[in-house]
């Protein structure tokens, strides 16, 4: 079966579900209006209105069909300028750009139901693994969009993929089988964009992306999960494409080259509450990742281990505090990038009978000694109207993970309406 036939297959399955009378149709739309001002550069970064509708159709057969869309209008067009060709996305995963300022996207479109004791889901969807909050070790089934770097919630940054999932109970365990015939990889904006992660020594932004073949290089995964003596445990395996590319430069043709490799990921998670404190941990080992040596320009293969340890505290009424430590270790690399560490601290406070939520998140990179601080406040005027304000602040040297975006530090304000 070719990849272009997968959406057709889903449509056929959906049509069979619709042959039985639908029990009901649920609809929820959220309209968000927001603006961000980059105070360091003295310019507006975005002035955006987005409509995010969701429809859920339920049928007598217990099947459901979920459709989530997104329409976005940005008057500034600095985050993903123009009408990008989207070289990081497979054909049926791409968004539409009717103009330089508008974007239309089918975010999710999947069919699911129980077949006996098994749960099956087919379509364009998000598959979430792992226990870490924001820092990814095992949560790599879906790639991320870096349109706004790592600033939005991760649910909004994940790129839903055409995929199939089955969850099957096996005694005290649940086995989750995953197939992803969609070659979309992590999406960085081009060098002219505000949060581009791609260097451009030639100054013209000409990029060649050699993505894997969607069907021949499908991703396959197995996740086993269980609950034992208050411990939430999982064992994970994924054969997949490393979503972050190897970036090289062709000085003869003056091209930026991005290509990818396949890898086996094995790992697991463990979490458990201890009174008011919850312990979370996640570990993973990639069999292959390619690194370019700064000094020689040669490419080296290495296996990579990474882990996250987190503690969540909720012992004080209306407060939530979470801290994490993240480390990546490249076993075959002998330079300053062999080991990388980051820490995070999240503090959240609910007030006014939960109508007001205040939140502060700090991510600190121990290698580059730079940081990102995100401050936000949300006030629910009613169940349907929420006012929002906040700031995303980058600190550190220009060569650092976060310091490179110092001039993109921003102040934000907006509101959302649901109906």
Image: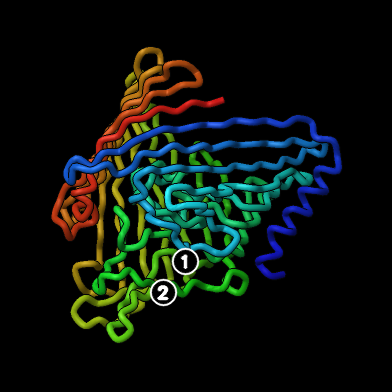
**Is the N terminus in the top left, top right, bottom left or bottom right quadrant?**
bottom right
- Residue tagged by mark 2? 208
Local packing at callout 1 (Cα closer than 10 Å; few below 14, some 14-19, many 20+) is some
Front in this rendered view, residue 418 or 365? 418
Q: How far across and how far down the image is residue 166, in percent? A: 67, 52
Give the crowd class for mark 2: few <14, some 14-19, many >=20 residues within 10 Å: some
CB under 8 Å between callouts 1 and 2?
yes
Closest to the observer, 375 or 418: 418
Residue furthest to the right in view is 20
| Colour theme | rainbow
Q: Which x, y percent locates residue 157?
A: 44, 48
Q: Which mark is residue 403?
A: none
- For mark 2, give the secondary structure: strand
Left or right, 367 with respect to 288, comes to left
Residue 224 or 319: which is nearer the viewer? 319
Q: Earlier in the sequence, mark 1 or mark 2?
A: 1
Seen at 50% across and 53% down, the residue is 97
* Disc ID at residue 87: 1
Q: Vertical placement of 36 versus 267: above or below? A: above
Cα separation between marks 1 and 2: 8 Å
Quadrant that contains the C terminus? top right
Secondary element under disc 1, as helix, strand or loop, is: loop
Q: Can residue 302 be seen in this snapshot?
A: no
Q: Quadrant of residue 7?
A: bottom right
Left or right, 60 with respect to 342, comes to right
Q: Quadrant of residue 82?
A: bottom left
Residue at 31% across, 63% down: 191
- Residue located 65% across and 66% down the image: 3
Residue 136 appears at what percent x and percent y?
40, 53
């Amino acid at each position: 079966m070719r990849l272009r036939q997968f959406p057709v297959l889903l449509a056929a399955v959906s049509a069979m579900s619709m042959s039985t009378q639908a029990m009901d149709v649920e609809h929820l739309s959220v309209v968000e209006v927001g603006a961000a001002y980059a105070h360091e550069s003295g310019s507006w970064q975005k002035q955006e209105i987005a409509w995010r509708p969701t429809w859920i159709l339920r049928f007598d057969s217990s099947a459901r069909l979920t459709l989530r869309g997104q329409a976005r209008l940005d008057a500034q067009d600095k985050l993903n300028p123009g009408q990008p060709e989207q070289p990081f996305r497979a054909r049926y995963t791409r968004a539409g750009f009717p103009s330089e300022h508008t974007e239309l996207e089918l975010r999710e479109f999947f069919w699911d139901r129980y077949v006996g004791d098994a749960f099956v889901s087919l379509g364009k969807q998000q598959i979430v693994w792992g226990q870490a909050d924001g820092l990814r070790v095992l949560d790599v089934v879906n790639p991320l969009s870096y349109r706004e770097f790592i600033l939005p919630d991760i649910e909004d940054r994940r790129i839903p993929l055409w995929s199939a999932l089955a969850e099957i109970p096996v005694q005290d365990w649940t086995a989750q089988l995953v197939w992803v015939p969609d070659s979309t990889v992590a999406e960085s904006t081009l060098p002219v964009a505000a949060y581009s992660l791609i260097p451009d020594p030639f100054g013209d932004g000409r990029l060649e992306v050699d993505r894997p073949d969607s069907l021949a290089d499908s991703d396959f995964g197995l996740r086993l999960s269980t609950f034992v003596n208050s411990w939430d445990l999982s064992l994970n395996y994924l054969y997949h494409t490393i979503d972050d590319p190897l970036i090289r430069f062709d000085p003869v043709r003056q091209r930026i080259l991005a290509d990818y490799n396949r890898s086996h990921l094995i790992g697991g998670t463990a979490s458990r509450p201890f009174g008011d404190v919850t312990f979370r941990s996640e570990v993973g080992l990639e069999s292959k990742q390619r690194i370019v040596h700064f000094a020689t320009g040669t490419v080296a293969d290495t296996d990579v281990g990474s882990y996250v340890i987190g503690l969540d505290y909720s012992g004080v009424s209306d407060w939530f505090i979470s801290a994490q430590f993240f480390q990546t270790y490249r076993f075959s690399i002998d330079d300053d990038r062999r080991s990388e560490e980051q820490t995070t601290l999240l503090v959240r406070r609910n007030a006014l009978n939960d109508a007001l939520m205040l939140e502060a998140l700090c991510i600190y990179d121990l290698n580059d000694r730079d940081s990102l601080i995100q401050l936000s406040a949300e006030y629910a005027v009613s169940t349907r109207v929420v006012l929002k304000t906040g700031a995303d602040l980058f600190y550190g040297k220009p060569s650092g993970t976060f310091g490179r975006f110092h001039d993109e530090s921003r102040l934000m304000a907006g509101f959302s309406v649901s109906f």
